Image: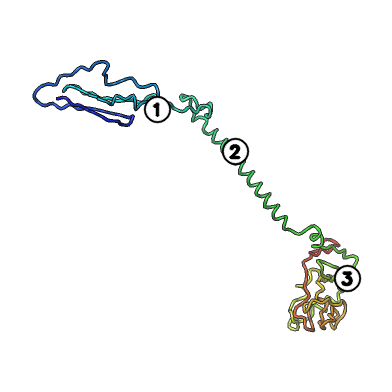
């Protein structure tokens, strides 16, 4: 029995096979095929799909065989060009027979080094930008110069009160005597409108540092005056003692104590 296979216009990857089935009557004889009608023709020189499609022997293709043999027609595309990336590869990896894995750690270390250096540079640049942005919102140099004031305590005699200007406000510095210290520390807290001990308002008992702004309506009291020998506000009649505590009048709170510190003979306020 002879089998005939016919094919139309198929894709370039054409594959045809013809199985043989015996009819049980007689042995099929193989039919010789002329040389000019050979099943397999030479592949075209070009590898494009269009040229290969036109060169395939798909018109009138016949395959004849006997019961003891089979015929298959295959077209292997072995001329496909493979891109060459040799110019972009490292020299040590171009040779397929070399041991490229031996220098993997070295190449990874270089990659980590570059990534680490870039991260450090980026972090430093970000820190600089943030620092510049925050610095632009800080106080000017002339404002910072007025933020602190240094006072030579040796120039203030005992029992005297001196007024300075600090941040646009009057600053009272009082060099108290031992009698004033004992008198203020003996005042009972239950008699005070704004209870505070003298120890809470002074770092050194000899020195009283307060802001000379009345807590009633912001007037400036007079030093060494009033019913308690401290400060007196003539605007509305508020009396403060030698510790700056309100003792009489409409003021609700004691005179404010600013932050200050001592450095040898210097009093640093601010």
Query: Mark 2 or mark 1: which comes first in sequence?
Result: 1
CB-based contact (under 8 Å), mark 2 and mark 1: no
Closest to the observer: 241 or 121?
121
Going from the N terminus, do you reach mark 1 or mark 3 first?
A: 1
Looking at the rendered structure, the number of numbered marks drawn on it comes to 3
The residue where tag 3 is placed is 162
Q: Residue at x 20, y 17 (%)?
A: 32
Q: Mark 2: which secondary structure? A: helix
Mark 2 is surrounded, within 10 Å at the Cα level, by few (under 14), some (14 to 19) or many (20 or more) other residues, namely few
Q: On screen, 198 above or below 78?
A: below
Q: Position of residue 128 (x, y in %)?
A: 68, 49
Which is nearer the eye, 227 or 92?
Answer: 92
Q: Distance between the residues labelled 1 and 3?
A: 103 Å
In this view, the residue farthest toward the left is 25
Q: Earlier in the sequence, mark 2 or mark 3?
A: 2
For residue 61, which quarter of the picture? top left
Task: Give the residue number, with chain letter if any, for mark 1.
Answer: 48
Residue linked to disc 2: 114
- Dots 1, 3 in contact, CB < 8 A: no
Indicate which disc residue 119 carries: none
Taking 17 as reference, is 50 left or right? Answer: right
Classify 10 Å Cα crowding around label 3: few (below 14), some (14-19), many (20 and above): some
In percent of the image, x 79 and y 61: which residue is there? 143
**Residue nearest the observer in this picture, 197 or 96:** 96
């Amino acid at each position: 029995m002879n089998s005939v296979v016919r094919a139309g216009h198929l894709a370039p990857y054409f594959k045809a096979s013809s199985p043989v089935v015996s009819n049980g009557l007689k042995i099929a004889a193989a039919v010789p095929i002329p040389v000019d009608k050979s099943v397999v023709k030479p592949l075209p020189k070009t590898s494009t799909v269009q040229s290969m499609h036109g060169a395939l022997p798909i018109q009138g293709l016949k395959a004849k065989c006997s019961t003891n043999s089979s015929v298959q027609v295959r077209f292997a595309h072995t001329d496909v060009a493979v891109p060459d990336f040799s110019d972009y590869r490292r020299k040590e990896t171009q040779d397929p027979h070399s041991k490229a894995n031996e220098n993997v750690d070295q190449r990874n270390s270089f990659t980590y080094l570059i990534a680490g250096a870039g991260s450090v540079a980026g972090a430093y640049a970000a820190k600089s930008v943030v620092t510049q942005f925050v610095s632009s919102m800080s106080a000017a140099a002339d404002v910072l110069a007025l933020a602190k004031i240094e006072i030579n305590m040796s120039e203030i005699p005992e029992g005297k009160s001196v007024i300075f200007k600090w941040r646009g406000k009057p600053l009272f510095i009082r060099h108290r005597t031992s009698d004033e210290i004992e008198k203020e520390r003996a005042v009972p807290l239950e008699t005070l409108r704004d209870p505070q001990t003298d120890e809470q308002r002074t770092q050194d008992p000899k020195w009283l540092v307060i802001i000379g702004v009345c807590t009633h309506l912001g007037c400036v009291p007079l030093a060494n005056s009033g019913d308690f020998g401290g400060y007196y506000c003539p605007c509305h009649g508020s009396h403060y003692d030698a510790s700056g505590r309100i003792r009489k009048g409409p003021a609700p709170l004691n005179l404010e104590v600013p932050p200050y510190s001592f450095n040898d003979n210097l009093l640093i306020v601010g």
